[in-house]
Amino acid sequence: MDCLFCKIAHHEVESKILYEDDNYMAFLDIDQKEAEGHTLIIPKKHFEDYMALDSKTLNDMFEIAQKLNKDLMAKLDKSACTLLFNYGDSQVIKHVHLHLLPNFLYEKGTKNIDEVYKKLKEA
């Protein structure tokens, strides 16, 4: 399978990982212009879109989002976060992913991925 997110999940493509366990991974989106801290949560198992998910996987993804959102907002000094699934033609990569978009409706990102990652990894 030639899926970019499957390759990231198997560490074949470098990414800025914020969370990982046996079944899931969360990493910074390469383009931080939409929202500084833009994070993607994926199951490591390939599902094309959220309609293919079982309820456990969907619930697990939202539990990870809750955990990550606290750090994103605190460390990046944000006051809001949008959670988003794209579906159909609006889904660029056909591997289900949940977007966390801090302050998405209020401001655009001004930092690059390396700057954001460094800030998030600080103690």
Image (cartoon, rainbow, N blue to C red):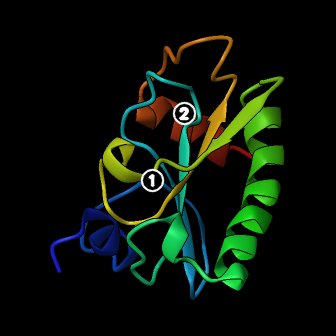
- The percent coordinates of residue 11 (x first, y second) are 33, 74
Tag 1: Cα neighbours inside 10 Å, few (<14), some, or many (≥20)? Answer: some
Q: Are marks 1 and 2 in contact (CB under 8 Å)?
A: yes
> Toward the viewer: 65 or 56?
56
> Toward the viewer: 82 or 90?
90
- The percent coordinates of residue 32 (x first, y second) are 45, 29
**Quarter of the image where one finds residue 75:** top right
Give the residue drawn at x 48%, y 20%.
111
Give the residue drawn at x 42%, y 76%.
47
- The percent coordinates of residue 102 (x first, y second) are 68, 30
> Toward the viewer: 2 or 116?
2
- 6 to 84, vertically: above or below: below
Quadrant where the N terminus sits is: bottom left
Q: Which residue does the numbered mark 2 point to in the structure image?
A: 116
- The percent coordinates of residue 92 (x first, y second) are 30, 47
Give the residue drawn at x 38%, y 57%.
15
Amino acid type, label 1: Lys
Circle nearer the N terminus (1, 2): 1
Amino acid type, label 2: Val
- 73 to 44, vertically: above or below: above
Q: Is residue 15 left or right of residue 108?
A: left
Q: Which residue does the numbered mark 1 point to in the structure image?
A: 16
